[in-house]
């Protein structure tokens, strides 16, 4: 990876702090890291422009009326995964759609108001994209953890469960 696209150890520390509190001010981050708010802003701007960092806001899905999570594994015609994926992420209930390798070429993740919405969404998606074949699906009625957060039964964050994204594949770090 070119040096300009590398994440430094200082960037890693900054990203870990943001994982703990994504709403922390540049000033608070700067005080923790012993630098200036301007430097924090410049680092985050660089990481964002390079596509190495993206920001996302989530909410307590059950309290927001979206308690059901569904994942569809699907196969789109060989030349269409990108177009189908871009169309699907525009649907309000679709949280993520990714092209993947293997038996299926798309994974679609959605949040729904009810279990009955699973079949409605699957039918709508396949009607709009007739070449798309949903081959498997899973549904979750509760998340205990998601995106590095632990949740209570109502979907509210209890705390951070930081992933070890910096270790080499195949190694693990144990807490002592």
Image (cartoon, rainbow, N blue to C red):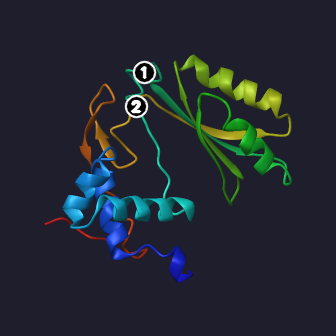
Q: Are marks 1 and 2 in contact (CB under 8 Å)?
A: yes
Q: Is residue 77 left or right of residue 123?
A: right
> Is disc 2 surrounded by few (<14), some (14 to 19) or many (20+) residues within 10 Å?
few
Quadrant in which the N terminus appears: bottom right
Residue 155, image x and y in percent?
Answer: 34, 29
Q: Name the residue tied to disc 2.
A: 59
Residue 163 drawn above or below residue 156: below
Q: Is residue 164 left or right of residue 67?
A: left
Residue 7, image x and y in percent?
Answer: 44, 72
Quick check: can you spot residue 42? yes
Dot 1 or dot 2: first in sequence order is 2
Q: Is residue 137 left or right of residue 145?
A: right
The answer to which of 34 and 57 lies nearer the viewer is: 34
Q: At numbered mark 2, what does the secondary structure look like: helix, strand or loop?
A: loop
Quadrant in which the C terminus appears: bottom left
Q: Name the residue tied to disc 1.
A: 64
Q: Residue at x 67, y 25 (%)?
A: 121
Q: Within the image, what quadrant is residue 172 found in?
A: bottom left
Q: Residue at x 39, y 31 (%)?
A: 142
Q: Residue at x 84, y 48 (%)?
A: 77
Residue 70 drawn above or below residue 20: above
Residue 48 drawn above or below residue 115: below
Which disc, if any, is residue 144?
none
Q: Is residue 121 left or right of residue 131?
A: left
Q: Residue at x 81, y 27 (%)?
A: 127
Residue 46, image x and y in percent?
Answer: 49, 65
The answer to which of 75 and 65 lies nearer the viewer is: 65
Residue 49, image x and y in percent?
Answer: 56, 61
């Amino acid at each position: 990876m070119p040096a300009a696209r590398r994440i430094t150890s200082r960037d890693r520390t900054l990203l870990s702090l943001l994982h703990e509190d994504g709403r922390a001010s540049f000033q608070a981050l700067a005080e923790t890291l012993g630098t200036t708010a301007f430097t924090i802003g410049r680092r985050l701007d660089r990481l964002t422009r390079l596509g190495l960092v993206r920001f996302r806001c989530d909410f307590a899905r059950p309290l927001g009326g979206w308690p059901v999570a569904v994942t569809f594994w699907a196969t789109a015609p060989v030349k269409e995964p990108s177009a189908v994926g871009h169309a699907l992420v525009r649907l309000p209930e679709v949280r993520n759609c990714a092209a993947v390798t293997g038996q299926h070429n798309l994974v679609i993740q959605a949040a729904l108001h009810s279990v009955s919405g699973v079949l409605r969404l699957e039918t709508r998606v396949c009607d709009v994209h007739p070449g798309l074949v949903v081959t498997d699906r899973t549904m979750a009625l509760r998340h205990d953890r998601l995106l590095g957060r632990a949740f209570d039964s109502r979907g509210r964050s209890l705390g951070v469960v930081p992933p070890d994204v910096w270790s080499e594949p195949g190694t693990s770090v144990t807490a002592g």
